[in-house]
Amino acid sequence: MTENVVVLGAGYAGTGAINKLQSELGDNARLTWIADVDYHLVLHESHRVIRDPDVRSDITFPVNQIADPSTRFIRDEVTGLDVDEQVVELTNSDDVEYDYVLVGLGSQTAYYGIPGLEDHSLTLKSLDDALEIHEAVKEASQDATRGDPAQVVIGGAGLSGIQTAGEIAEFRDEHRAPIEIHLVEALEEIFPGNDPEVQQALRDLLEEAGIQIHTDDPITEATEDHIEFDEGEPLDHDILVWTGGITGRDAMDTADLEKEHNRVNTGANFQTSDERVFAIGDSAIIDQGDRPAPPTAQAAWQAADVAGENISRAIENRPLQTWEHVDKGTVISVGEKAVAHDVKPAFGISLPVDTFGGIPAQNLKKMIAARWIADITSWNKARKSWSSL
């Protein structure tokens, strides 16, 4: 009997799983890939597009460069998952039947009920988002003067917020644009929950770039031209970018699966409360004991291999593998500069410091992205992308 295997999403989770499934599934399975775009975006480099839209050609890869000829691809938006009928519901196409489905739809921005925030902010969850921020910054800077600079506020000082602020600072410097940049974080320090050493290293780079940092005061309301704080004075903005949180996709809202805020709960084997449905990446809350796996690109890359193999095992009625997330460290860019922290030793060589910057950190960040591109396409394409990473 031929099994229908369907993968949802073209992010790290979906793309990585397709890559694995194409090598794992035999002639007894048909593979269908569904996504709302016909390319894979190296999302953790999408902030580069804010500074220079031409970068997009180096960080997007058409699905036909990734999918085998035998893999059926459908470009459409997923609107629902009916686990009783075993169908994926789409906006413009007929329902797609499945025997096994892997949910890798990623996430959408969470606004935490803050009044006006969704209506008055931009986000960075896609290529179109990055292009929209670029155009907004470009237009605002053209209307500004040295005496009255454009005010750009980034809400949320996690990885996306920090990297967004860094790219806007590079745009400002390259174009000598009259822009003031503010990075706002509700908690006591930027890059919350991480080692104070890397927090300070990032703060140093941000301040060197002329970015004003506001911490320990949550946003309580956003309007068309300013944000309100719990305690501090309002902060004016011409552009507000919100990077402060994630929640699950609306498509999972009616799916009869155990989930939290539309993120599907799974075991360490990626199987959900329905044995025919697997989930990975930001779409999932993956059991890892004391705490779930983090919603990061690194975790999605690691998970995709095991999830793909487990679907193949399920088809063959073999025991499923469990997955344990291994944190291999963090590398964050601030414009052209970067900071690396707690990077695991490679080839048996121990690093002399936990946190470092400079050219080693810059090249390490490039190498991480290049390795991913090579895995899903080829090293030749990774080399061509190197200068944009």
Image (cartoon, rainbow, N blue to C red):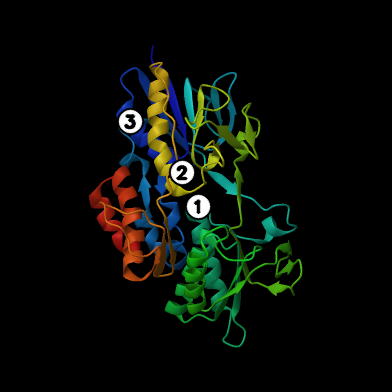
> Mark 2 or mark 3: which comes first in sequence?
3
Q: Give residue 335's quadrant in the image.
A: bottom left
Q: Which SS class for mark 2?
A: loop
Left or right of residue 121, residue 15 in this image = left
Which residue matches tag 2?
37
> Mark 1 or mark 3: which comes first in sequence?
3
Of residues 276 and 118, which is closer to you in this image?
A: 276
Left or right of residue 254, residue 100 in this image = left
Q: Residues within 10 Å of mark 3 (few under 14, many from 20)?
A: some
Q: Residues within 10 Å of mark 1 (few under 14, many from 20)?
A: some
Residue 385 x, y percent position in the rendering: 30, 57
Q: Residues within 10 Å of mark 2 (few under 14, many from 20)?
A: some
Q: Quadrant of the N terminus?
A: top left
Q: Is residue 150 above or below residue 129?
A: below
Given the image, on which type of amino acid does mark 2 rest?
Val
Q: Is residue 369 above or below residue 226?
A: above
How far, Cα to Cα, is label 2 from label 1? 10 Å
How far, Cα to Cα, is label 2 from label 3? 20 Å
Furthest-bottom residue in view? 147
Furthest-left residue in view? 380
Q: Which SS class for mark 1?
A: loop
Residue 52 x, y percent position in the rendering: 42, 66
Given the image, on which type of amino acid does mark 1 rest?
Ser
Left or right of residue 270, residue 369 in this image = left
Q: Give residue 146's quadrant in the image.
A: bottom right
Name the residue located 31 percent from the left edge and 21 percent from the top edge.
Answer: 26
Task: Report the disc number at residue 126.
Answer: 1
Name the residue located 51 percent from the left edge and 27 percent from the top edge.
Answer: 271
Camera-nearest label, 1 or 3: 3
Q: Give residue 15's quadrant in the image.
A: top left
Marks 2 & 1, CB-CB < 8 Å contact: yes
Which residue matches tag 3?
22
